[in-house]
Structure formats: structure tokens, C-alpha cells
Image (spheres, rainbow, N blue to C red):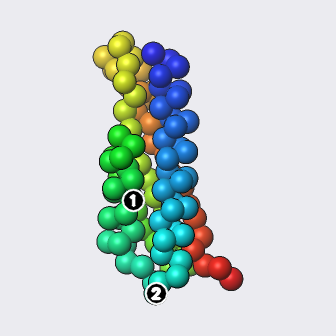
């Protein structure tokens, strides 16, 4: 169960990093993307990877921020209240869309 939780967190961080990079690359040639455009693409990638999109936005400096959560599949840890924080992974990634 511990290994499952660790793999979940590490895997989720990779998914979030890749999502932020993909969304940024897809939007870099267009005019300023909206939060809705970013959220739509990020949501699709989150669902494909068994995660839940918590946040998807672009700040005033052109930095895309993606935040996702995913629960590890465990036999025991998910049933112990004190261990639930280890089962639910949260990851955040930031990616700059400005080429300058």
C-alpha cells in the first residue's frame, strides 16, 4: 500500500508537468488563451490519467498553472483516517508560455 501511494504521487506529478507543458505548447502560438480554454484541455488530460483537475489558469505573466488530485488504489491505507493524506496525492505545475 505504501508503494502504491508513493507511485501515485510521483506519477501524478509527471502527469501535471506534462499537462502544463502540453497546454502551454498548444496555446503558445495563439492570442492570450482564456482560463476556460486551458481548463478544457487540462481537464481532458486529467480524466485520461485518472485524476481530478483542481485548478487550471494563466496568470498575468503568461504562466500556466495546473493543479490535480488523484487517489491511490490501496487495500488498507485508504481505510485508515490517519493515513488518508498519504493516499490522496496533489500536484502542481507551472509553465511559462511567453517565449521572450
**To which residue does mark 1 refer?**
42
Q: Position of residue 52 (x, y in %)?
A: 33, 46
Classify residue 85 as left or right of residue 60: left
| Residue at x-position 31% and y-position 17% | 79
**To which residue does mark 2 refer?**
31
| Residue at x-position 57% and y-position 74% | 97
Q: Is residue 82 visible?
A: no
Q: Position of residue 66 (x, y in %)?
A: 46, 58
Of the pair 62 and 25, the residue shown nearer to us: 25
Q: Quadrant of residue 25?
A: bottom right
Question: Helix, strand or loop at disc 1?
Answer: helix
Q: Position of residue 18 (x, y in %)?
A: 53, 54
Q: CA distance from mark 1 to mark 2?
A: 18 Å
| Residue at x-position 35% and y-position 13% | 75
Task: Give residue 100's mark.
Answer: none
Classify residue 13 as left or right of residue 34: right
Position of 25 relative to 66 (above/below): below
| Residue at x-position 65% and y-position 79% | 99
Quadrant of the image for the C terminus? bottom right
Q: Residue furthest right?
A: 100
Amino acid at each position: 500500500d505504501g508503494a502504491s501511494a508513493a507511485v501515485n504521487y510521483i506519477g501524478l506529478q509527471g502527469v501535471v508537468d506534462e499537462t502544463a507543458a502540453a497546454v502551454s505548447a498548444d496555446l503558445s502560438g495563439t492570442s492570450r488563451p482564456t482560463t476556460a480554454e486551458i481548463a478544457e484541455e487540462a481537464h481532458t488530460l486529467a480524466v485520461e490519467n485518472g485524476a481530478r483537475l483542481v485548478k487550471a489558469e494563466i496568470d498575468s505573466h503568461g504562466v500556466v498553472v495546473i493543479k490535480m488530485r488523484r487517489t491511490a488504489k490501496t487495500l488498507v491505507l485508504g481505510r485508515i483516517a490517519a493515513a488518508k493524506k498519504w493516499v490522496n496525492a496533489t500536484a502542481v505545475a507551472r509553465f511559462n508560455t511567453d517565449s521572450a
